[in-house]
Image (cartoon, grey):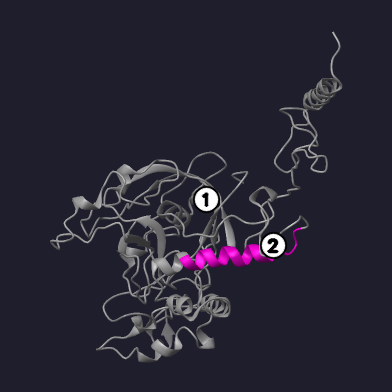
Amino acid sequence: MKLSKHLLYVLAAGAMVFSSCSKNNRPTSTDPGSRSTATGIEYDEEDGGFAVADYSDVPEGPGLVFIEGGRTTLGSSEEDVAMTRDNIERTVTVASFYMDEAEVANIHWLEYLHYIRKDSSEEIYAKALPDTTVWERELSFNDPYVNYYLRYPGFRYYPVVGVSWLQAQDYCTWRTAMVNKGLAANYDGELTEGSTPPIESGAILPNYRLPTEAEWEYAAQALIGTQLSEEENQTNKRIYPWDGHQVRNPYGKGQGQFLANFKRGRGDYAGIAGSLNDGAMITEYVYAYPPNDFGLYNMAGNVNEWVQDVYRPLSFQDVEDLNPVRRNGVQDDSSMYDVAGFQSLITNTVRVYKGGSWKDVAYWLSPGTRRYMEQDSATSTIGFRCAMINTGSNK
């Protein structure tokens, strides 16, 4: 029986693939080889075949730090002083991801406003403006911050505040587009005007987004610093994003200094003149205070931070144990809560925020604590940082 030339070609190619595999030359995402290990057909776009783009690794995302995922225990190990019982301890696994090393700062938001005004309508620009009136208080002279906190150069690298969850989402979408626009400029493939490289090219980044509550809490814990060795043993759990039960630095030059920007007690925001401790009456420089073991700054204090999740008191028992998130009211419908009768504030538009702020006492600095607010609301104590998935590897 005679074999067609095409079949002979496929068989020969398959033999080559088998031969190469037998020598442990396994294909990888970054080195898939020149032929398919499924069909033996050559990857050749010029002859109408399936093309595989060159790919070395995920391009570096500006501002991001790699967070190696793993198993952890989420939830609060502190006394539940609010008696909410909404974050009982449970074991989950969080996949590796990326997160901003610091909070999104005023200068970043001003850059955003600049391009929004340049490329969009005045209506969209107005929608992107932070609510600077969050600083106003009838019985407190915070008036200067209304005009100066966002725009004055001295506050450039202070965390942006007065931003709602919805505005933070819009910023993530814009940031993704702008970063990928820059990466597309170095893409050598064919593009139509105004388009970006396809996902298959590997030349652009995944979306910037708000971290899930589980990702945020996992990143704040930074328990990689509590391991004795490469074995799965940890010396201790953490109440805060650092070791120990205290909020002061127990070591070295900074001994006795506070490790976060928070309210120490009634009327005490910073210490006394001549010996200021945390040094911040309101917010502080986004790189102030030592980073945690993942290299993240201000995962406790300075400003609370928005996360993706819709708030539900029973999320700890409802969500999956791999990459948990609650995006809606599945298994816990909002109709079960008496919002109309003012017996509840829980709806599908309230979002979780984490971390404590310059205006909060130390209790809220613990990663396991959680609070919530309407997604279209803003305060002078809530900001955010972005996250991004990791692709191809956990390391």
Amino acid under disc 2: Leu
The N terminus is located in which quarter? top right
**Badge 2 density bin: few <14, some 14–19, many ≥20, Cα 10 Å:** some
Q: Is residue 293 above or below residue 148?
A: above
Position of 143 with respect to 293 (left or right) is left
Q: Name the residue that disc number 1 marks.
A: 224
Amino acid under disc 1: Ile
Q: Which of the 4 image quadrants contains residue 37?
A: top right
- Residue 273 appearing in the image: no
Which comes before the other along the chain, label 1 or label 2? 2
- Residue 210 appearing in the image: yes
Give the residue furthest to the top.
1
Position of 221 with respect to 395 (left or right) is left
Q: Position of residue 84 (x, y in %)?
A: 22, 55
Give the Cα distance between marks 1 and 2.
Answer: 32 Å
Position of 257 with respect to 40 (left or right) is left
Local SS, label 2: helix
Q: Name the residue that disc number 2 marks.
A: 183
Give the residue furthest to the left.
341
Q: Is residue 145 above or below residue 171?
A: below
Q: Position of residue 101 (x, y in %)?
A: 55, 64
